[in-house]
Image: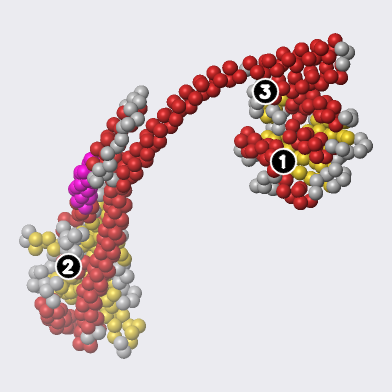
């Protein structure tokens, strides 16, 4: 058997688990929304970072494209290159003039590591800023000159240039030399080599992320020089997120690698704070439940104690109503005290009723002498009538004895329709003798109606009224019809006579259940009995036509015989 628990034993776990469930659900939803918000914010931040990197990269490239454009459109430079193309014998003179110009540009721009001018005759004039030389260079002479169709071409050098122990990575931008007097005439190509740090400083300014420039899958620029020239898979590690944006000018990809570790730490910290808050709230609620329920449970214990006394038979037990009781407990205590007081009074009345019933039973036993004496006397008269061959009198006496036995034995009890009809036949026999004429009884009962049960003597007042008020002193044939049928679980009884009928005013009074008519107290009693027996489920009404008939309709709930 499951062990019963106290109210406090049920409330505290209920408050605990409901609080845990509610706060836990709130925490999960909050954490989910927080993570979504942080992730969206982070994605926006990364996107903005890449946009800014792209803009910074364009600014740097604008600077060097402008420098290259000025060099390629400089009339003096174009004239020098054309002279070299026309007369290679003056290469030293013209070459020196061009080298001085290239030297000036490199020295004016720190990040420009070298400039090469490649003529259409494949004469290469250069200045190496790293070696500060225009005649010897370990790397600049090996730079492949790109084919520039239009505008500016970009390329990068995978292998670094060594200056002592220092590695220097570079990228190049190239442009055609154009004589605007004849734009279709080829002159040469200019290639500027720029330190990779310019790219790195332009795109990698956010300390929270790692930014790389990719040409396809190859790394063009990175914060770690050792990664330049490697493929991007080298920087992809578990737990890292990536984002990318294409730079339209170079065709290189700005590749952003970042970690969610910091954001996860923020979420975990928030979860820890929620846990602390939840523990505090649940602790406070448990203490409050204990504080609030303590006086209530004490009041309940007082109520239970009084109930136990009442259960043991002490009906003097009362619940003392105290000021610290809640409204509900006060109401319970007040109703309990009233109920116990009424119950005590009822028990006293029952005891008195039992005593009165015993006295009534003794009186009833004593009163049984009179009915037995009456039955024996009627039996003696019956035999005397038979001895004197007064058979009609004998029949009437026998009918009277049967009527008395039926009426006295268990008055008001239920009987079968068959027994009730048998009794009515005896009753009508005596009434016929009283009228001094034969009373014709016509019966029409369905098979189902014969098996029903009704209370005794329900129909007798209506038969008596039919004979007394309808058929008395009637000339001609006197007919009394009794019909019964079962419809919708109701036994429909119709008692009809062909007597004088009822006036319209009296008919209205008879059908009014609230009207009491002095000459028809039997009908009033029948209405009361129907109400008592069937609690309003039975029905009664009259219909009549003066000088023709009176018809009584009685509706009784069906109760089949056992």
Q: Would you place residue 352 above or below residue 57 in this image?
A: above
Tell me if I can see residue 496 in this picture.
no
Residue 208 spot, x, y in % from top left: 19, 60
Q: Main secondary structure of the magenta part?
A: helix
**Where does label 1 land, which residue?**
520
Q: Is residue 129 left or right of residue 222?
A: left
Quarter holding the C terminus is: top right
Mark 2 = which residue? 201
Q: Residue furthest right?
A: 476
Residue 164 appears in the figure: yes
Q: Quadrant of residue 218?
A: bottom left
- Residue 323 place in picture, x, y as percent: 24, 46
Q: Which residue is mark 3?
A: 408
Disc 1 is placed on an element classified as helix
Q: Residues within 10 Å of mark 3 (few under 14, many from 20)?
A: few
Residue 129 % position (x, y): 11, 72
Point 63% across, 40% down: residue = 536
Label 2 crowd (10 A; few <14 / some 14-19 / many >=20): some
Left/right of residue 33 with respect to residue 526 in the rendered view: left
Compare residues 366 and 459 and report the one nearer the observer. Answer: 366
> Measured along the vertical axis of the image, is residue 199 above or below residue 34?
below
The residues colored magenta run: 270-294
Other-residue count near label 1 (Cα within 10 Å), few / some / many at <14 / 14–19 / ≥20? few
Say whether residue 159 is left or right of residue 440.
left
Circles 2, 3 touching at the beta carbon (< 8 Å): no
| 271, above or below 552, in the image | below
């Amino acid at each position: 058997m499951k062990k019963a628990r106290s109210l406090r034993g049920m409330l505290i776990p209920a408050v605990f688990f409901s609080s845990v469930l509610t706060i836990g659900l709130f925490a999960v939803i909050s954490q989910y929304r927080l993570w979504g918000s942080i992730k969206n914010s982070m994605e926006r931040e990364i996107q903005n970072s890449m946009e800014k990197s792209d803009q910074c990269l364009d600014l740097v490239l604008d600077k060097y494209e402008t420098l290259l454009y000025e060099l390629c459109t400089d009339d003096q430079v174009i004239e020098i290159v054309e002279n070299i193309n026309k007369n290679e014998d003056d290469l030293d003179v013209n070459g020196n003039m061009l080298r001085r110009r290239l030297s000036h540009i490199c020295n004016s721009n720190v990040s420009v590591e070298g400039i090469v001018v490649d003529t259409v005759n494949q004469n290469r004039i250069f200045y190496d800023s790293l070696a500060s030389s225009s005649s010897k260079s370990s790397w600049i002479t090996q730079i492949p000159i790109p084919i520039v169709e239009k505008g500016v071409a970009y390329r990068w050098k995978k292998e670094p240039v060594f200056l002592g122990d220092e590695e220097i990575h570079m990228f190049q931008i190239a442009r055609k030399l154009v004589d605007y007097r004849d734009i279709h005439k080829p002159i040469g190509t200019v290639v500027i080599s720029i330190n990779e740090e310019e790219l790195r400083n332009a795109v990698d300014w956010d300390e929270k992320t790692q930014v790389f420039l990719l040409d396809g899958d190859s790394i063009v620029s990175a914060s770690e020089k050792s990664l330049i020239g490697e493929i991007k898979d080298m920087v992809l590690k578990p737990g890292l997120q990536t984002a990318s944006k294409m730079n339209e000018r170079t065709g290189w990809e700005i590749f952003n690698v970042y970690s969610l570790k910091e954001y996860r730490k923020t979420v975990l910290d928030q979860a820890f704070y929620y846990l602390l808050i939840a523990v505090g709230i649940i602790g406070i609620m448990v203490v409050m439940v204990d504080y609030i329920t303590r006086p209530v449970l004490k009041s309940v214990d007082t109520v239970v104690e009084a109930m136990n006394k009442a259960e043991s038979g002490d009906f003097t037990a009362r619940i003392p109503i105290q000021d610290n009781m809640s409204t509900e407990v006060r109401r319970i205590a007040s109703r309990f005290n009233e109920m116990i007081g009424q119950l005590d009074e009822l028990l006293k009345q029952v005891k008195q009723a039992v005593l009165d019933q015993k006295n009534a039973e003794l009186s009833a036993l004593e009163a049984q002498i009179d009915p037995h004496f009456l039955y024996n006397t009627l039996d003696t008269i019956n035999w005397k009538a038979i001895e004197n061959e007064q058979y009609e009198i004998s029949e009437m006496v026998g009918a009277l004895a049967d009527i008395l036995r039926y009426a006295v034995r268990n008055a008001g009890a239920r009987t079968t329709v068959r027994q009730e009809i048998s009794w009515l036949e005896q009753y009508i026999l005596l009434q016929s003798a009283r009228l001094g004429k034969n009373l014709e009884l016509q019966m029409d009962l369905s098979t189902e109606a014969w098996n029903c049960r009704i209370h005794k003597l329900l129909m007798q007042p209506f038969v008596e009224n039919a004979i007394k008020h309808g058929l008395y002193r009637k000339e001609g044939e006197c007919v009394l019809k009794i019909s019964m049928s079962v419809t919708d679980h109701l036994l429909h009884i119709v008692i009809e006579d062909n007597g004088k009928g009822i006036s319209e005013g009296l008919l209205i009074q008879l059908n009014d259940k609230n009207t009491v008519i002095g000459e028809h107290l039997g009908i009033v009693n029948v209405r009361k009995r129907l109400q008592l027996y069937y609690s309003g489920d039975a029905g009664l009404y009259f219909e009549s036509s003066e000088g023709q008939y009176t018809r009584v309709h009685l509706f009784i709930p069906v109760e089949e015989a056992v």
